[in-house]
Image (spheres, rainbow, N blue to C red):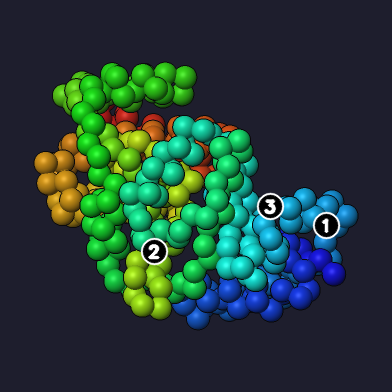
Amino acid sequence: MLLDIKRLSFLVNLQNFPSLVIDTLLVQESLTERIKVLVKILYFTRMASDEYRQLFKNYSKRVDSLSWVRYESDGTRIHLHDNKNLTIGKLPKVFNLEQYSCELEARQRAGDLCPKIIKTCLEDGYILESKISLHPYNKSSSEALKLLKERLFVPNLLSISEYFSRFDHVKHSKLVREVAINYGLTEVIVSICHGDFWSGNILETSNAAVIILDWEYCGERVQSYDAWFLVFSKWASEKRHCDSDYYLHLQKVFTMFYPIDSDLKRIKVLHMIHLFERFATHLSFGKSSIAPEMEFLEAELISITQELSL
């Protein structure tokens, strides 16, 4: 019997249903979140349709013993869990060879900060990695960011025009570049970044070793991107406008990691650039411009470009 948990987007066979419930509950950060997830599992579990049973059958060819599939999420990959062999297969919905190559390099540099890669496929971007028992990360996220920066930072100084030339096809590219240049930002330090560095992707093992998950947004960006997203993700999750409190919080984090960029005006210019980078990345993965996150990103991008243009 194959079950479909629609609200959580899982396909699971009855035999592995208890394991899925336990695994899903364990990664929640609070009792409240566990109760919410449990309610969703109980309320939204249905018999899988013929179409989804066929999907499960197709995906089972990619791992040795498929336990369950997560077929939709906020990310860009389908996750294939094999609890018997403790592996997870990750298959991109839209394959981007440049991103995939960058991710493999970044994960090699990160080493034990991310799950071990077992198998890769250059034809479709498939990655098979070790499945690790993980728990919520209880230390400061800044400590994890420091570890990540030490492993990934490979500086590359580019003119702002050269860097933005890769985005010529993206909406708002010309405006963002012009605002940055008018401010006086003619060069940027670019480096490999994780690309989705927020609290939900920072976990730890039973031995308190830091593990950073979900590398599918990995790419070469202006160096402060991960520090920016660590702060911005909290506002974005609530669709809150980036106000003075936001910039003070961002300034505090930048002062720790990028003191040369901690001037408030400069922070706003970098915030604008990072908003645009996030917007462009989502577009490259085929995300709709009318999706809620995209509309929020674009609204904030327009707001900050207007403010900096005054």
> In the depicted view, which residue is nearer to us: 203 or 130?
130
Residue at 23 percent of width and 31 percent of height: 156
Please identify, in this view, whether the residue under mark 2 or under mark 3 is nearer the observer: 3
| Res. 93 image quadrant | top right
**The C terminus sits in image quarter:** top left
Asked if the residues shown at circle 2 and circle 3 are in contact, with their CB atoms under 8 angstroms apart, the answer is: no
Q: Quadrant of residue 14?
A: bottom right
Amino acid at the residue labelled 1: Arg
Query: How far is mark 2 from mark 1, CA to CA?
Result: 33 Å
Identify the residue under disc 1.
53
Q: Residues within 10 Å of mark 2 (few under 14, many from 20)?
A: many
Mark found first going from the N terminus, 2 or 3: 3
Element carrying mark 1: helix
Residues under numbered marks 2 and 1 in contact, where contact means CB atoms less than 8 Å apart: no
Q: CA distance from mark 1 to mark 3?
A: 15 Å
Q: Could you say where residue 204 lies in the image, as x and y percent from the top left?
A: 39, 70
Q: Compared with residue 56, is residue 274 higher up or lower down, i.e. above or below?
A: above
Q: Which residue is mark 3?
A: 62
Left or right relative to 287: residue 247: left
Residue under pointer 2: 211
Amino acid carrying mark 3 in the image: Arg
